[in-house]
Amino acid sequence: MDHRFFNPALLPDRRHTNSVKWDTLGGKYGREDLLPLWVADMDFPSPPCISEALRRAVDHGIFGYYAPPDSYYDAFIAWEKQRHSTEVRREWLRFTPGVVAGLAWVLSSLTSPGDAVAILTPCYYPFMEVIQNTGRRLVCSELAAAPDGGYTVDLEDLEEQVRSQQVQALILCSPHNPVAHVWREAELLGILDLCKRHGVLLISDEIHQDLVYQGYTHLSSLRFQEYLDRMVMLTAASKTFNIAGLQNSFAVIPNKALRGAFDAYVKTLRVSGGSSLGYVAAEAGYAQGGPWLDELLVYLQGNYACFRDALLRALPELRVAPLESTYLAWVDLSAYLTAEQLIPVVRDQARLAVDYGFWFWPEGETARRDVHIRVNLAASREMFPLAAERLAAAIQALPRN
């Protein structure tokens, strides 16, 4: 492939740069000698258009109060239209300093303490933390297995949870993290219709909307006009262009009354906006970063194929979920390991730093039995044969019954 915009050979050394992924292994995993394949940011530099825009801003040398220009909002609105066939109006847009923070603001402003809030498990674990930290009550509906080895929603169970637990809000991860599933139209409409019938606020986290691979199409919840009155969509350029450290995100709130309640809450926080550099980076990415993203997606898909194939050659009974979106591989090790063996084998023998499957469940029996790992694929390709080799060697060295 001709890398005109995204160059996988340009990988700066991230060690000793205060990188969470590379420099906090000792605190997180208890040892420093691990191959870091965990926290979801990329080892690749952001698109050149972002670096150039930031360089211009830094060269100006003044970092005072900043009023984001119309071009910032226009770039995002155009991106949603061109990349996702989604119409977004300027008056719907609100700033948040990250999707998880935005989620906390939405729950705090649009639900009440003690309200039941549902998620689809396994699910990105900060969702559970935000629900509980804001004094809301966590309700879980487990995803169902799909024939292709992936996942789907269990609408019957979800409706039972909504009805019996009097759920007031549902946080939908779309596309879904950690299982990398892109919701099909029938699935999404089933969820939206259920929420409408039961008066449930849908909070759709679409931060991975741009990281979708050939053969799959992300359908934003905003595309379905008849459901907009009870919906908030959260998204950001952070995963798309690797700018999470700049903390700039959107809450998209079509309903005027919900916007008013959100605005009233944010007013009490005295947070009027974000960093000037966060605005500059996001605008540059949305305005000019498309070609870079297209090349990145091809490379990430190649990393997935490399890792999956190397694993399955050595460990043919493994189950690796289809990578429809994100850059996160979801691997089921239960054919070879017990839950008790997971950390000793993966961390101590294979020397891999990954996200463990039990992190994506609330504490309980299901979490204790989980034998999945989530592997970050946004790194140099040469890391993945090595990771597969280490994992296979560690598993094959186990005593056999």
Image: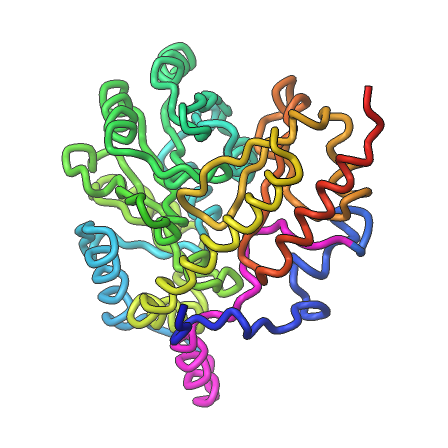
Above or below for 283 versus 253: below
Q: In this rendering, does residue 304 appear at all?
A: yes
* Extreme residue in the left direction: 226
Give x and y (percent) for residue 9. 55, 73
* Extreme residue in the front direction: 313
Q: Residue at x 38, y 24 (%)?
A: 153
Q: Is residue 47 magenta?
A: yes
Quarter of the image with the C terminus in it: top right
Residue in the foreground of this view, choosing between 265 and 249: 249
Q: Which quarter of the figure has residue 22? A: bottom right
Give x and y (percent) for residue 279. 38, 69
Q: Residue at x 26, y 39 (%)?
A: 221
Q: Is residue 54 magenta?
A: yes
Q: Is residue 79 left or right of residue 173?
A: left
Q: Which quarter of the figure has residue 181? A: top left
Give x and y (percent) for residue 117. 43, 26
Q: Which residues are magenta?
A: 34-63
Q: In this rendering, does residue 115 appear at all?
A: no
Q: Residue at x 56, y 36 (%)?
A: 129
Q: Residue at x 62, y 61 (%)?
A: 382
